[in-house]
Image: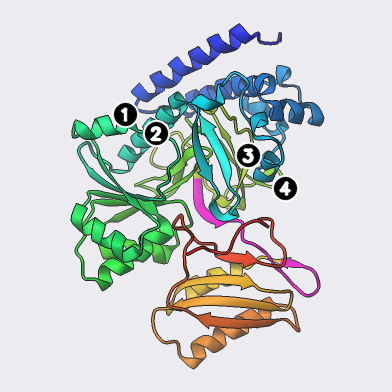
Amino acid sequence: MKRHTADAVVNMSFGTRLEALGLLAMKSFSQREGLLRYQSRRLTFLVRYAAENVAYYHRLFEKSGFDPRHFRGLQDLQQIPISSKDDLLSCPPEDLISRRMKVSRLLERTTSGSTGRPFQVRCTRFEERYLSALRLRIYMKMGLKIGDRVAHIRFLTGASGDESWLRCLGRLGILRITRINSSLSQFEITRRLEEIQPDVIDGYCNLTSITADAAEQMGMRIRPRIVIVGGDVLTPKMRHRIAEAFQTQVRETFGSHECNLMAWECRESGLLHVCEEGVILEIVNDGLPVRVGERGEVVVTALHSFAQPFLRYRLGDIATRGPQTCNCGLPYSTIRSIDGRIYDRIILSDGRAASPGDVLSRLEQKSDWIKQYQMIQESSELVVLRLVPKRIPEAGDLAAIHEMMERFLSPGMQHRIDLLEQIPHDRRGKYRASISKVFSNYADAPENEE
């Protein structure tokens, strides 16, 4: 297959834009075969485009021996080398941007998430509008209606973005969105929600749960028709608290700054549909796909990102794979659960790196007096477990936690339990469940900021 010329790239890019715009006018793919053909076409073009126009991928492909000219689409997906955020941060920012783009005209988003390492994600106005429109269409599948009042609780920055078309919709009364900064206290957020009385609340899982508690404490009656949450892990208890406080249904989403919306909760099955018009999402263990019901790392390819492509990009999230198709009849593959960011592991005295996930999950399942938790390894000898109690714990409650920690840690290691009124979230309204000051794959991540 001959190499694309620059003119051909421009023409094909225009063609893919027309195809993407046409996609927005469709309700959805009715058959999985058509969806997979669409993914394969876009993937093939994106891989060749990145090889020609993005220095990082040109070098990566040459080093790994991957030849994009012979790439055949989805069937060759695993031939593409996996990249991580560390890989992208290690090279000059300009090497991540298509040489066909003017950087000064691109929109910018800054992501850090649980890693705490700032990372610039750039896109064109077209890419931004398309992905936002796709998100809007999926929200309508989850229950959003024309004319709804929406309270959007997210971290508000001065980063450039293109929401002019959403403002136009608002002026027409089609969609009325009020932004609430997630860096506000849960009590101030609650007061704003009472003023707005939204039909839909859209916010981070953890912060929305804390806000739901605040609403009950303050005796405020806020009754949205639906609450849509994402951005961090939604546990069963958090879902229950949100549903009880707001007397409504809760729907989970899974997204990122790099890829926008990647999955959403099915109203019929409770599984998460992968947004396969926008991404190819893999769940892998040691680079190989996991089976249904197994956990693994999430690796994504953004099908509509040409300014700054993301090809088989390791997000740092853990998920459990669901069935290939859902009982609801939609043609999308599914995720059974989002199990969260990769925890900082605890370094034991024998040098082993132990995952705190099992301990933290048992706290969630068995300790009804615990509202929130965080594990911090202060040194090679000391691990601190921060707990926010719902009530004053009894001696037996604390004894059970101490016993659990002793079984988890190596002999000779010490632990301490700190009971706090609250665990401060970071400036984005999120918090990390596990932090190691001894060794971390997220070495530059700061402890949660006030």
Q: Residues within 10 Å of mark 4 (few under 14, many from 20)?
A: few
Task: Please determine whether, in this image, residue 238 is positioned above or below residue 75.
Answer: below
Asked if residue 312 lies left or right of residue 339, the reply is right
Q: Which residue is mark 3?
A: 313
**Residue 148 in view, yes or no:** yes
Q: Is residue 167 above or below residue 223?
A: above
Q: CB atoms at circles 1 and 2 under 8 Å apart? A: yes
Which element carries disc 2, helix, strand or loop?
helix
- In the rendered image, which residue does mark 1 sit on? 165
Residue type indicated by callout 2: Ser
Q: CA distance from mark 3 to mark 2?
A: 21 Å
Q: Indicate which disc residue 132 carries.
A: 2
Label located before the other in sequence (1 or 3): 1
Question: For this rendering, which residue is in front, 319 or 89?
Answer: 89
Residue at horizontal 50 percent and vertical 53 percent from the top? 337
Q: Are marks 1 and 4 in contact (CB under 8 Å)?
A: no
Pointer 4 residue:
286
Q: Amino acid at mark 3?
A: Tyr
Closer to us: 239 or 58: 58
Mark 4 or 3, which is nearer the eye?
3
Colour pattern: rainbow
Q: Is residue 79 left or right of residue 132?
A: right
Cα separation, mark 4 vs mark 3, equals: 14 Å
Marks 2 and 4 in Cβ contact (< 8 Å): no
Between the residue at mark 1 and the residue at mark 3, the CA separation in whole angstroms equals 29 Å
CA–CA distance between discs 1 and 4?
A: 42 Å
Residue 245: % across, % down: 27, 65
Contact between marks 4 and 3 (CB within 8 A): the answer is no
Helix, strand or loop under label 1: helix
- Is any part of residue 333 visible from this angle? no
